[in-house]
Image (spheres, rainbow, N blue to C red):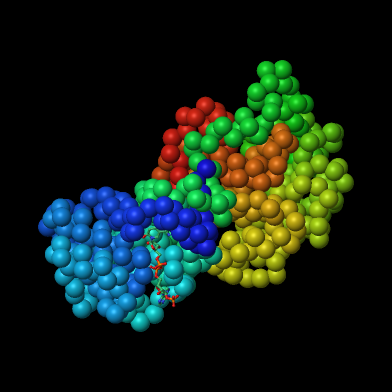
Amino acid sequence: MLTAHAVDDIRTAEQALAAGLPDGELMRRAARGLADALDDIPAGEVLLALIGPGNNGGDALYAAVHLLDRGVRVDLCLLDPSTVHADGLAAALAAGAQVVERPGQQRHCLDAVFGIGARPGLTGRAAEWVEWIAATGPRTVAVDVPSGVDVDGATLPSTHVTADATVTFGTYKTALLVGPAAGAAGRGAAAIPDLVDIGLAPHLPAPHIEAIEASDGHLLAEIFDWLRAPTSHKYSRGVLGIAAGSTQYAGAAHLCVAGAQAGMAGMVRFVGEAELARRVVDRAPEVVAGRGRVQAWVVGPGGGDDAAAQLAAALDDGVPVVVDASALQHVPDSFDVPALLTPHAGELAQMLGVQRETVEADPLGHVTEAARRWGVTVLLKGARTLIATPGRVTRVNLTGSPWLGTAGSGDVLAGLAGSLLASGADPHDAGSLAAFLHGAASIRANRGGPVTASAVAAALPGTVAAFHDGHLDDVRDWRS
Ligand SMILES: NC(=O)C1=CN([C@@H]2O[C@H](COP(=O)(O)OP(=O)(O)OC[C@H]3O[C@@H](n4cnc5c(N)ncnc54)[C@H](OP(=O)(O)O)[C@@H]3O)[C@@H](O)[C@H]2O)[C@@H](O)CC1
Ligand SMILES: Nc1ncnc2c1ncn2[C@@H]1O[C@H](COP(=O)(O)OP(=O)(O)O)[C@@H](O)[C@H]1O
């Protein structure tokens, strides 16, 4: 699991670690790691370091000493000479750095204006530097976090640095993983920042955010007991009931079933209008049409006018339920069964009575509020899907790419999540594992290019196997 911590927790851990170390050792470690991460800047090139008033600037000044040592030239722009890290500045100047009044033609830039001490947003000189970066396009590496972002809330104020890459220390920060702020931390292969180990881990409490990684396949055997039992059968694996599709959205039924069949459940039941049920069974003969005993329900993908009645019937069954798409408009005020709600930003906005843009500007805040309001798990779909449950660490999904934003892709996700729920996962694990596998399958189906929802579903069984076996390649979102 990859983890991000809250700023206050990082500061407390940093103090505990520093107490056992010689003065300045933490900053030395950070600076060394930062300089190592910048080793692709050739000797002779000029790096402009934008230096703020705190320790973030200090890290960059000491890193500059290493860079100067190996022949990189370093220009320094100081936000305020009277508050700069004095010892760091003296060391950088002694090693050959020069202070310049304003940015110029430099092709490499180090953003060390603010780190975790930042208040969101930039003004004055720092805002002018952001304009310079946007206008001249130097390769920009942010130190710890891109300056100006909201570090714990992961929102993006209007003025902030957008970096090509970020080098962070000790642990991830929420803004580096969660959108929209994460979009300012790096691009392409650098979309997930480099993490420099400074020895902080033993001092860190529970994380603020976590993300499933390719190496977390052990979770499957930990969550699904039957995976360890050679005597398991279809009923011990669990039966999923699906109430999805309508005359208008018949495909949603097929896609939801396809997602479910790639999951963990031993059997899928389909409940719907007779002609649709016949077509579902024609395409997927393993599916059993009609009501019967199930261990979980998926209600809503491509649903029609009967979504409210189908949701009420599923809730009456007393088993866990995935509530998707049209059924989201009919959620009760509170749930008596474990539930996983799977809205996209537009649907969550409607549920909360706000504008879609409001949710998109602060997805973490809104998914947290919805999970609290309904007392269940809410999975907010998007570029960095979030899964929030009261009392659990919120998860963010790092797999997939914008190609996954394709019609019907959410139907596959709902089916898969339901299948995991029916098979014994709680809604938090079911939602986060489904989002992980769904994104990973889209990459495996066609890395870097278009995918259909059907192709994602077709790639899921192999993805589940590779994840379980620990052979999953890197399936993170490497957007350019
Ligand atoms: N934690 C760790 O384990 C380690 C941390 N390390 C490094 O330390 C960094 C944190 O350093 P830091 O605490 O000195 O905070 P930093 O962000 O440099 O500056 C805060 C100053 O900026 C000011 N200010 C803030 N926002 C502003 C704004 N929008 N506009 C204007 N001013 C603003 C703020 O003013 P104030 O809010 O107090 O008024 C304060 O004066 C961390 O990110 C990492 O790089 C490593 O060295 C080793 C291990
Ligand atoms: N930019 C993106 N990057 C990664 N995944 C995305 C992106 N945009 C959308 N997705 C994913 O694609 C799926 C779309 O689901 P949804 O909006 O319900 O589509 P539909 O209603 O057509 O099935 C979700 O899993 C979402 O997280």
Viewer-closest of 467 and 59: 59
* Left or right of residue 59, residue 406 in this image: right
Where is residue 261? Give x, y as percent.
66, 32
Residue at the extreme top: 231
Residue 251 in view here: no
* Residue at the image position 39 percent from the left and 59 percent from the top: 144
* Residue at the image position 41 percent from the left and 56 percent from the top: 18
Residue 256, quarter of picture = top right
* Left or right of residue 476, residue 396 in this image: right
* Left or right of residue 130, residue 228 in this image: right
Does residue 433 sit above or below 88 in this rendering? above
> Quarter for ligand 1?
bottom left
Does residue 79 sit above or below 326 in this rendering? below
Residue 244, quarter of picture = top right
* Left or right of residue 429, residue 127 in this image: left
Residue at the extreme bottom: 124
Q: How many marks?
A: 0
Viewer-closest of 175 and 71: 71
* Residue at the image position 49 percent from the left and 30 percent from the top: 470
* Residue at the image position 40 percent from the left and 61 percent from the top: 145
Where is residue 300? Give x, y as percent.
73, 50
Residue 118 in view here: yes
Where is residue 371? Give x, y as percent.
69, 57
Where is residue 353? Give x, y as percent.
70, 70
